[in-house]
């Protein structure tokens, strides 16, 4: 049950195609924008009763070996207990999208709660990711939906904080609404969109995860690290933080897509020997 931190989205540089063309005003390019409301949408497929779309991402080159890789979507409007999203990937020569594809994850969006953004994220291990160039995602909507929609596609490596490392995390909320009281102490709510705030504290982290090289090494390794997170995402770039990567219900209920809080930027603290700690505060984006 690893905790994963992803901050470099390769989907933005990938060539993304679809088995069914989206609506004219909601192109595939919208899935490469940060604002979830600027979405990709399919209307005709639902009204015709054919509610399945295959999405293909071509990275242009094979991937190097990574420990954990995240693949999924945010702001998808599949209905709870009905809609499904299947993630698969494959490596092969040529440009044909026929495959072969290896099914890696099949998941229904059935989180039992409608107050959080619908997201489905799968974590792939190094054995599946190594030498993979082509990725495929199948999204299925029900015919009772008026349209199918995806806000953001994510495809990126991550820092993997494996089981055995102490991880303390908490979930709170930012509520920008106001509560007005009348002279008679009657309450009137001015409700606004609430967002989740995830706080993770990691201790016992080795230099490999903190700085990207093993203790005693004289050369850095090309792996995700907290220092790379600091310089690549900072407090303005996008991140995904999963306090628990399994089972999938934890990913949807506790995983947050957003940005690191500028008031509490990630700080690497040396504890002793090959032990470091870092605290992260992630503010959700809607």
Image: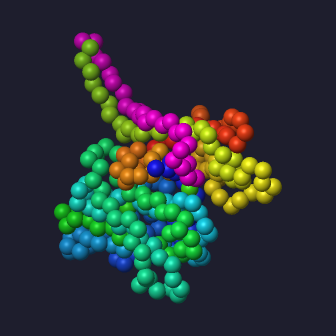
* Front residue (pair 81, 144): 81
Q: Quick check: 49 left or right of 55?
A: left
Residue that lies at the very extreme toward the right in this rendered image: 218
- Residue 186 rendering spot, x and y as whole percentages: 24, 18
- Residue 251 rendering spot, x and y as whole percentages: 40, 50
Q: How many marks?
A: 0
- Residue 187 rendering spot, x and y as whole percentages: 27, 21
Q: Quadrant of residue 171?
A: top left
Magenta segment: does it hold 239? Answer: no
Q: Quick check: 241 left or right of 23?
A: right
Q: Which residues are magenta?
A: 159-184
- Residue 188 rendering spot, x and y as whole percentages: 27, 25
Question: Vertical placement of 118 versus 89: above or below?
Answer: above
Residue at left 57%, top 39%?
Answer: 202
Magenta segment: does it hold 177? Answer: yes
Residue that lies at the very extreme toward the top in this rendered image: 184
Q: What colour scheme was applied to this rendering of the protein?
A: rainbow
* Front residue (pair 272, 198): 272
* Front residue (pair 94, 177): 94
Q: Quadrant of residue 146?
A: bottom left
Residue at left 55%, top 48%?
Answer: 161
Residue 270 visible to the viewer: yes
Q: Quick check: 183 left or right of 13?
A: left
Residue 147 visible to the viewer: no
Question: Vertical placement of 161 versus 105: above or below?
Answer: above
Residue at left 46%, top 86%?
Answer: 96
Question: Vertical placement of 121 versus 161: above or below?
Answer: below
Residue at left 42%, top 39%?
Answer: 196
């Amino acid at each position: 049950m690893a905790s994963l931190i992803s901050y470099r989205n390769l989907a933005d540089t990938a060539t993304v195609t679809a088995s069914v063309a989206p609506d004219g005003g909601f192109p595939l390019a919208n899935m490469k924008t940060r604002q979830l409301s600027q979405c990709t949408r399919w209307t005709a497929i639902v009204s015709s009763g054919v509610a399945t779309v295959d999405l293909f991402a071509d990275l242009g080159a094979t991937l190097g070996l990574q420990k954990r890789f995240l693949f999924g979507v945010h702001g998808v409007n599949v209905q709870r207990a009905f809609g499904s999203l299947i993630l698969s990937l494959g490596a092969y020569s040529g440009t044909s999208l026929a495959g072969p594809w290896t099914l890696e994850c099949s998941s229904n969006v059935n989180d039992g709660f409608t107050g959080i953004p619908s997201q489905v994220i799968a974590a792939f291990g190094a054995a599946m990711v190594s030498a993979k160039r082509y990725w495929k995602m199948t999204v299925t909507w029900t015919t009772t939906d008026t349209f199918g929609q995806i806000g953001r596609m994510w495809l990126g490596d991550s820092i993997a904080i494996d089981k055995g490392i102490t991880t303390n995390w908490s979930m709170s909320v930012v509520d920008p609404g106001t509560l007005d009281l009348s002279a008679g102490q009657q309450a009137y709510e001015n409700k606004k969109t609430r967002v989740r705030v995830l706080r993770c504290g990691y201790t016992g982290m080795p230099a490999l995860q903190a700085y990207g090289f093993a203790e005693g090494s004289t050369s850095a390794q090309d792996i995700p690290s907290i220092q790379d997170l600091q310089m690549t995402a900072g407090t303005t770039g996008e991140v995904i933080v999963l306090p628990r990567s399994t089972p999938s219900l934890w990913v949807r209920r506790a995983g947050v897509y957003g940005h690191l809080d500028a008031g509490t930027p990630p700080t690497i603290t040396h504890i002793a020997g090959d032990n470091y700690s870092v605290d992260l505060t992630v503010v959700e984006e809607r």
